[in-house]
Image (tube, rainbow, N blue to C red):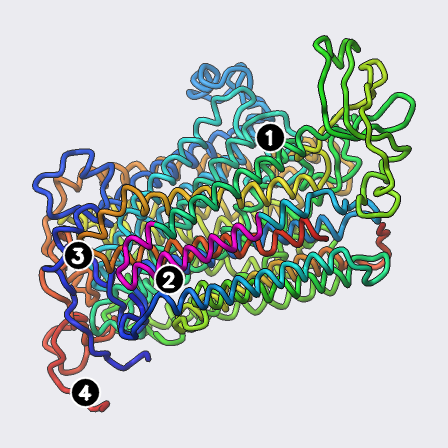
Amino acid sequence: MSDSEQPVSLNSYIRLCAVVFAVVLCTTGLMIGTSFAHIGGDTWTLKVALILAIAVVNAFLVAGYLMHLLSEKKLVYTVLIFTVIFAIGLVGLTMAAMNDFPPGTATH
Amino acid sequence: METTVQQFPPFREGAADHSHASHDDHGHGEHAEPNFWQKYIFSTDHKVIGIQYGFMSLCFMLFGFFLMLLMRWQIAHPGVPVPVFGPILERILGQPAAGGSISPELYNSFGAMHGTIMVFLGVVPLAFAAFGNYVVPLMIGAPDMCFPRINMASFHAFFLGGVVMLVSFFIPGGAAQAGWTSYSPLATTIATNGQAFWLVGMVLLITSSLLGAVNFIATIIQLRAPGMTWMRLPWFVWAQFVTAFILLLAFPPLEAAGVLQLMDNLAGTSFFLPTGLAVGGQLADRSGGGSPLLWQHLFWFLGHPEVYVLILPAMGIVCEVIANNTRKPIWGYKSLVYSVLAVGFLSFIVWAHHMYLTGMGQKIATFFQATTMMISVPSVIILTCMFLSLWGGAIRINTPMLFALGFLPMFGIGGLTGLPLGLAACDLYLHDTYYIIAHFHYVVAPGTIFALFAGVYFWYPKMTGRKMNEFWGRVHFWCSFAFMNIVFMPMFVQGIKGMLRRMSDGGVNYSAARVPNAIDALPGSAMQMNGIILWAAVCLGIAQIPFIINLFWSISHGEKVGTNPWRATTLDWQTPTPPPHGNFTHEPHVAHGPYEYSAPGAAADFTPQDAPADKPTTAH
Amino acid sequence: MDIPYTIKNRPDTGLYNAKLGVWLFLASEVMLFGGLFSAYILLRVGAPTGTWPHGWLDVRLGTVNTLLLALSAITTLLAWASCKVREFGKFKFFHACTILLALTFLGIKSYEYHDKLVHYEIQLNNGKIADGHLVEKSADFNLAKKTGSVTLHGHEVETHAELMDLRSEEAKKAVHAELIIPASEIKHMENYGPRHNTFTAIYFTLTGLHALHILGGTLVIFYFWGPGRKMWQTEPERFTNRIEVSGLFWHFVDLVWIFLFPVLYLT
């Protein structure tokens, strides 16, 4: 067990969970509100960016507190940092390659 | 962190407290007499699993080699019935092998399955899973792998994957025909369920690799014996460590792609099928809107790191064999470690150099050319360190060393001929020719497979307590070395002359005899090489017979040897032979680096890693 | 022979084996879903204007499912915390909640799948398109023989494009009624299954794989809750570790849904 040396109480966890769930409720509501609001005119780009930004907050809560990543060991961070770099490389370079054409190529 | 020796609690913590309760988790050793099934089929012992992997993968490699012989016959003598095996083929496979000759469809499935079997069922399981499983826990002084039951599950997933691949030969329409790269939309539009079998098989094999990779990384990080610091790890373990990370992070995108292609094939989706796709002159009944290039990106995101999965464990084996037989420390251990880490990292961002021909723009092509040139630097450092290790050594020549020495120039040829392929301008011409075939086979066939042979000859005494026959080992080496080169060297020439790969007639339709005045016709000399290659390949097959006999004969008849016949330093040779359950009879406490050969002032010309540190070091 | 660090942390890494193992596994899962999300992005960005659907999924059901998973993530954490403070009864209660929440999630998900599979788009011979949920097929309905008829609860539109954005003002004005369509008028009939277009394809694939993860996680949690709980008697610390590790996986599955919900339901 990782932190058996520090005293734990169930109530402290319940308090943490109550806060996390309250925030999740708010962020979910905010996402839905953004989705149905009239933002950014006819294109979805701005809305998608806003909604995903809120989703990242949500994900941060789950990863940081529920998965207690914020108090995790250096080794786990190292593994995850490389994973994130490669995941960004996969998505980013694929996107870049798909949008880079030789001169004179007709695109839709 | 690298050089400090940490204070560890007793190695086997709490053994007395919970030994009664841990039976269900890794219940080996404590039980009285395991029966046959427990001992050989459902074993959780890393050594048994290593041997299971080794045996299976050698069988698969032999099978893949046999497929290749049939293809070479077809290339050299298109449409002529295969001698000896033709009637058997016709009886087993029916229509595709009508008259004992190989139809183009059958040639395509042989090609696809040869690649798949050699890569995913042959070399990776042998280099990574077999040697890794057997040797890594021994080398780091661990009693077993971290998760023994997951280790067993990994082997069973591999076995099932292999079965699914083999079964696909016998379904109507035959095995997958779209090449080992399975490019869409071809992989979806060919009317056979072989592709679905291929994908299910791949998902199983990927699952097996993922379970193995998690296990290896956790084992190397968590189970190193006291005193086994990172910079005291044998380089083989470093190579396996990086390989495991590559498998862990590069394979899942292919698993994702496999699931998407499976949906395309079975559920009728269009992930990789473009709008307006026509099949056989008819508009396909698909929604369209997909992207064939996406498959290539996801495939090569695994596909290129996979090359390093094939080569790094092989380099690790060569490193151990060379250090042991030159009787001196490996040259530039730290450069080797940093190079292998750099190779591992860079291998994730070079993949699109396989795709220059897909209409890629210059910005992205430049990026991938740059990273491709960059990755050759650490690779060359690794090779150079091994060459320099030979300098000034009192080299012992034995079979493992011969294969290791054979690896160096062969991998050199394979690597250097890859440079032109990493540059878009040359690649556009050489792409999809026999030049490519020659290039990557030099890397994996006389390269990796020679290193794997070296590993088999090297660790055989640890597994069985007997050495393999030296004379027949040398016969095996020299014949393999000669015929490998006769097989693959002409392919460079054929490729440069413009012979395309994947043609079931071996280029007859493009030959100068058929179209004499065409400027791109293949000259007769290029066509004649097909015959030379065929017979060299047959001889190469015959040259493996001494190895196969030697492998089995030596189990009971080989020269009996002690626990450390090569007088090696690493921990794998400091245990009884064959190692018992739990591997070590004493708790290894590591006090030396991995390659302390011929240390000045030492009693012997090698100092085992767990030898007591006689002189207090002045580092403190 | 016992393997070290199955319970206690290794001093230099600060982790026990299984915890490192599960984080490595989750790293590979990140790459798996990374590959799938890159497919989603490419399909969406590559879709010609007006061909990517909006509002095809029921936001209410998606929201309920989001909250169910969030709650189950919390009960999972509390189950682990109960083990840490050695209150086995509370552990049983919290993980019972987790399992029930997970099963409800899967139930709602299957209802949504069913709703898509009985939703038909029918191209008529007169060039119009009938779109709606299947009410019934007549007993002699046969598309090939052109006999019988099919009843939809839906509406007719002039072009396929009108069906793409159900959030638009025009789409909201559509009046849905029972339509009886004879087989002889049907040119092409297709449900909103995976093959309908790239959106339904990626929707079914992503949520299907996610549902498989939910199913796997539920089985594991059920095992520890049911037959596997006897380890609590002998090795409570090790059992607690198992609950932590399975909880990490469960939270990751929740994490994936946190992104699936907005990209599929809200945008």
Q: Does the stretch in magenta take in C81?
A: yes
| Crowding at mark 3 (Cα within 10 Å: few <14, some 14-19, many 20+) | many
Residue B237: % across, % down: 32, 63
CA separation in Å, label 2 and label 1 = 37 Å
Label 1 lies in what chain? B
The secondary structure type at the circle numbered 4 is loop
CA separation in Å, label 2 and label 4 = 29 Å
Task: Quadrant for residue C133, please give it.
Answer: top right
Residue B46: % across, % down: 24, 50
Residue B123: mark in rendering:
none
Q: Main secondary structure of the magenta part?
A: helix
Q: Amino acid at mark 1?
A: Leu
Look at mark 3 in the image and give the residue it sits on.
C2
Look at mark 4 in the image and give the residue it sits on.
B617
State the residue in front, B235 or C104: C104
The secondary structure type at the circle numbered 2 is helix
| Crowding at mark 1 (Cα within 10 Å: few <14, some 14-19, many 20+) | few
